Amino acid sequence: MSAIESAGRARVARALRDHEAEIAENWINLQVEQDVLVAGIGEGELRGEADQLVASLRGALADEQLPTARLAGEHAELRRTLADLSLRRARGGATPAAISLAVLALKDVVLEILRRSTRDATELFEAAVVLNRVLDAGGILAFDQYVATREEIISRQSRQLMELSTPVVRLWRHVLAVPLIGTLDTSRTQVVMESLLQSIKDDEAQVAIIDITGVAAVDTSVAHHLMQTVAAVRLMGADCVISGIRPPIAQTIAQLGVDLSAILTRATLADALAAALRITGDAPLPAGVGVGS
C-alpha cells in the first residue's frame, strides 16, 4: 500500500470515528431525500443498519493487508454487512439501483464531513479517492448480492412449481402414476425422476405409470427424456408403463424413428392401470369401479 493511500485511509477512518453519530444520521436523511428507502424499515432498524455499516467500514480501513479497492469484496465484516443490507432491502421490495444508491450515498455524507474538517485540497483528494474505491466497489457488491438473491428465489420458486406440476400419485397398492402436463424439458425431467424414484422407494412400488395425456407435443427431445425416466425407473427394480399415447403422438413418434417397442404403452390411464394390476398380480378392478374409486 502506498503512503498516499495509507494516509487517505487514515483520514477517512478518523472521520468515521470522530463523527460516527453524525454520519449515520446524515446518511439516513440523505436516503430519505433520494427516495431510496423501502416501506417497512423502522427508524431503529435504519439506525442499527447505519451504525453497523459505518463501524464495518472503519474496521475494513484499518486492515492494512488489503488494498482499498478490494476491501468491499474481501474484508469479511464489511462484505457481510453489505450483503445483509442488500438482502434486507431486497426482501422489502427495493430495486437493485436503490440498494446501490443507498450505499453510494454514504460517500457523499463522509465527503461533506471531510470537506469541513480538511482544508488541504491534496489531503481531501486522497481521502476522496479512498472513499470512491471502497464504496463504489461496495455499491457493485450490493447490486450483485441483490441479483444473486433474486436468482436464488426465482430458481427455488421455479423448482417448487415444477414439483407441484408433476405430482406422484399412488393409484393402487404398488402402483404409482405421474401425470405430465405441458413441456418436458431437461430440468423438469430431473424433478420428475427425483420425485418418482423417491416415491418408488418409499411406497415399494412395482409399477410406475407415466401419463403424457397432457403433453401437447412429443419431439425427439421429449422422447429422449421419457426414455431416460423409464431407464431410471427400471434401475429401481420397477416396471414402467407410458399412457396417453394419442394417435397424433403415436404418428409423430413413428415418424421420428423413436423405438418404444421395449416399453409398455397404453392409450389411456385406465388401460395403463389395468396393465399395471396384471403386472403386480393384484385383483382386477370390479365392474363399474373407476381409477379414482
Image: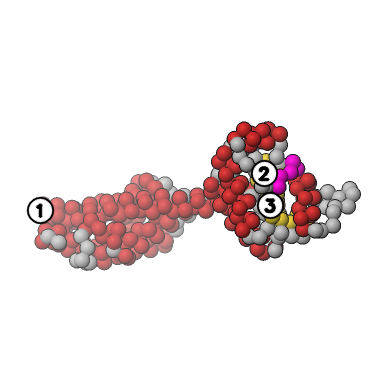
Q: Residue at x 32, y 58 (%)?
A: 25
Q: Is residue 20 left or right of residue 152?
A: left
Mark 3 or mark 1, which is nearer the start of the sequence? 1
Question: Gap between marks 3 and 2, in whole Å?
Answer: 13 Å
Location of the N terminus (image quadrant): bottom left
| Numbered disc in front, either 1 or 3 | 3
At which x and y percent is residue 291? 80, 50
Q: Would you say the residues marked 3 and 2 are in contact, meaning their CB atoms lie under 8 Å apart?
A: no
Q: Which residue is mark 1?
A: 122
Q: Which residue is mark 2?
A: 261
Element carrying mark 2: loop
Q: Amino acid at mark 3?
A: Cys
At which x and y percent is residue 293? 83, 52
For the stretch drawn in magenta, the main secondary structure is strand
Q: Which residues are magenta?
A: 264-268
Q: Which residue is mark 3?
A: 240
